[in-house]
Image (cartoon, helix red, strand yellow):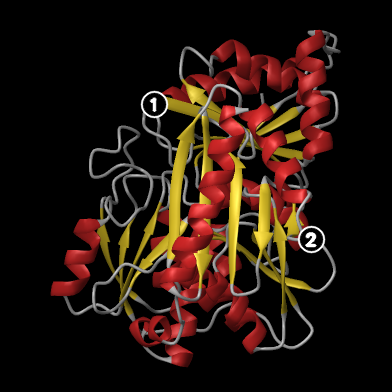
Amino acid sequence: MFGTSGIRGPVGETVTAELALSVARALAEDAGRVVVGRDPRESGRILEDALAAGLREGGSDVVRLGLAATPTVARSVGWCSADAGVSITASHNPPEDNGLKLWQPSGQAFDESRRERIETRLAEEEFDLAPWDEQGGETRWARARERHVEAIEAVVASSELTVAVDLGNGAGGVSIDALQAIGCTVETLNAQPDGRFPGRPSEPTAENCADLQEFVRTSSVDLGIAHDGDADRLQAVTDAGEWVSGDVLLAIFAREAASAGDRVAAPVDTSLAVDDAVAEVGAELVRTPVGDVYVAERAAGASVVFGGEPSGAWIWPNETLCPDGPMAGAKLVELIDRRGPLSTLVDEIETYPIRRDSLETDDKAGAMERVRKAVESSDNEVDTLDGVRVDRGDAWFLIRASGTQPLIRVTAEARKPARADSVFNEARALVRDALIG
């Protein structure tokens, strides 16, 4: 039921008020006080009411934030001395979807053991409901967004840069407030919250953010940033109006955050450009399964000063263990003020050819097992943390089953184009052989 980003799917099918009620009842058994917030999707109002009812019925007190960015919800768990938080969001998914993501007081998403405990209770459908005179109460906290701004303002320097912010009609208005609080001039695109996402699709990709790139290219602004629907993700556009790839932005953030002896956490599909950037400052890159939940779990460990995913999730564990898009925007502004234009920082990162493909199959598990056996019988350096990753030093490939589709994904990267093609073709042949059986 729980993916790496919580429960997510079509409203009225996967995600219903009945599901929200049951999740709340299961959560109430461990949580005496729970923070609840939602993104702008209209279906979130119904789900919020169902969550509040189930939590109170189980004896939990509910703190409602209303419309709030996911990192605001995650941070508010600790600020409100609560035991858990729930973000009602489908993040970057289309408007017909919604979902539930659960948070710990540290700002970290529920880990595997906590998710499994909720799933077990849902499967058993046995909830310990409170007596009529011991049901939970409900309050609203109107200062959550303001408190988030204060938290960002406390850890970044002031700036006079001009920033174009594309909220994608999502819940990330706190990002505008935070940038203005540190002294920036802010130009906005798609700033009106609207869960239909009329301005652009919610996911901040280069294709979806073409208007932002054109605006930066033709305006006197220093950079552009874009969020998804719940503002846990951030992507960027240079002062020249060029899209910054997630791997390059990860390399820039990691190089700035780390120093000799430190560690940076990133998933198994991260580019060699990040390895090089981390090595440049004497730090170590530690790999995680794909998913910001896993990056956060590793970021909570010793010596890890930063964690990130090329999809746009950025975590500074000394501040919070949730991906915080608004804080990432302020951190990027601070970095540019200190180190120079984003276009220059991008040019400093050497990038390498990367190849990707997906092959369809109805037997992902069987095919992946055959791939593992074939690879592990060779002399390759093999990592099976998430899929099968083979490191050749100057090149690598990753074969990984999709978590949501009947596909096996193949990724390969090398420092030279011909080498990338060779390793990619080798990996794709392994998958084709495995599909034949």
Residue 344 percent across, percent down from the top left? 37, 88
Q: Nearer the viewer, residue 184 or 202?
A: 202
Residue beneath label 1, please? 42
Label located before the other in sequence (2 or 1): 1
Location of the C terminus (image quadrant)? top right
Give amino acid for label 1.
Answer: Glu
Residue 313 percent across, percent down from the top left? 55, 57
Q: Residue at x 59, y 17 (%)?
A: 50
Residue 341 percent across, percent down from the top left? 36, 87
Give amino acid for label 2.
Answer: Ala
Q: Which mark is residue 300?
A: 2
Q: Which mark is residue 91?
A: none
- Relative to 170, residue 43 above or below: above
Q: Residue at x 38, y 46 (%)?
A: 203
Displayed quadrant of residue 268: bottom right
| Label 2 Cα neighbours within 10 Å, binned few <14 / some 14-19 / many ≥20 | many
Q: Nearer the viewer, mark 2 or mark 1?
A: 2
Residue 148 percent across, percent down from the top left? 57, 59
Disc 2 element:
loop
